[in-house]
Image: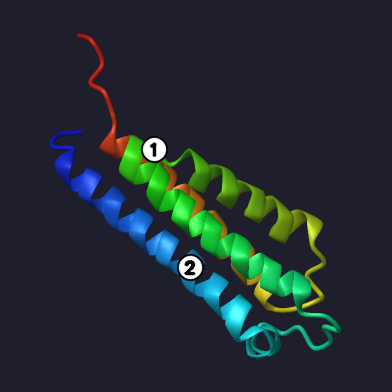
């Protein structure tokens, strides 16, 4: 695939953007919980513990994405988390709850596919010929 440096740079930028997305979502869920839930289409939430807990997990995952990539140049955690999110958001969750559920599932799917492709191109080994 020619020079892989551009793909490796793109991979690093992609990891930072995906981690930043998860970090921002996490912080908003933890500290602006009611506003986020209202914006996302959740009309009735009686307790904010679980949305806040979800925020904490988003921050932990964002940190894990960066940590794994910086230490090992791998994205296994990101791919696993995004695949689980797609299944949960598009298959297991009721779409009638809020507009943000299918939107988030599609967005996570795009991040999953995009990062998998870029990672593969960044680390493609030439076949023996």
In this rendering, position of residue 40 left or right of residue 64: right
Q: Residue at x 53, y 55 (%)?
A: 61
Give residue 23's mark: 2
> Gap in Å between the C-alphas at discs 1 and 2?
19 Å
Q: Is residue 78 left or right of residue 20?
A: right
- The extreme top residue here reads 129
Q: Is residue 114 above or below residue 50?
A: above
Q: Quadrant of the C terminus?
A: top left
Depth check: give the residue in front, 116 or 24: 24
Q: Residues within 10 Å of mark 2 (few under 14, many from 20)?
A: many
Mark 1 neighbour class, 10 Å CA radius: few under 14, some 14 to 19, many 20 or more: some
What is the basis of the colouring in this image? Answer: rainbow
Residue 46 pos. (x, y %): 86, 84
Q: Which residue occupies 62% across, 69% down?
A: 55
Identified at 76% across, 83% down, the residue is 42
Which image quarter: residue 36?
A: bottom right
- Is residue 112 among what the camera can see? yes
Residue 101 visible somewhere in the drawing: no
| Residue 5: x %, y % from top left | 16, 42
Q: In this picture, is 115 found above or below 33?
A: above
Most distant residue in the left direction: 3
> Tags 1 and 2 in contact by the CB under 8 Å rule?
no
> In which quadrant is the N terminus drawn?
top left
> Residue 85 at x, y = what percent?
64, 55
Per the rendering, the mark at residue 33 is none
The residue labelled by disc 1 is 74
Rendered view: 56 above or below 80: below
Q: Is residue 78 above or below residue 17?
A: above
Q: Of the two numbered discs 1 and 2 on the same chain, state the one appearing first in sequence.
A: 2
Of helix, strand and loop, which one carries label 2? helix
Q: Secondary structure at mark 1?
A: loop
């Amino acid at each position: 695939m020619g020079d892989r440096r551009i793909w490796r740079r793109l991979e690093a930028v992609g990891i930072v953007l995906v981690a930043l997305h998860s970090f921002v979502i996490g912080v908003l869920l933890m500290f602006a919980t009611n506003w986020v839930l209202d914006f996302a289409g959740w009309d009735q939430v009686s307790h904010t513990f679980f949305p806040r807990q979800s925020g904490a997990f988003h921050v932990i995952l964002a940190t894990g994405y960066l940590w794994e990539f910086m230490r090992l140049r791998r994205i296994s955690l990101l791919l696993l988390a995004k695949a689980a999110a797609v299944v949960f958001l598009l298959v297991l969750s009721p779409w009638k709850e809020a507009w943000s559920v299918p939107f988030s599932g599609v967005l996570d799917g795009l991040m999953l596919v995009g990062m998998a492709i870029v990672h593969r191109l960044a680390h493609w080994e030439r076949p023996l010929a």
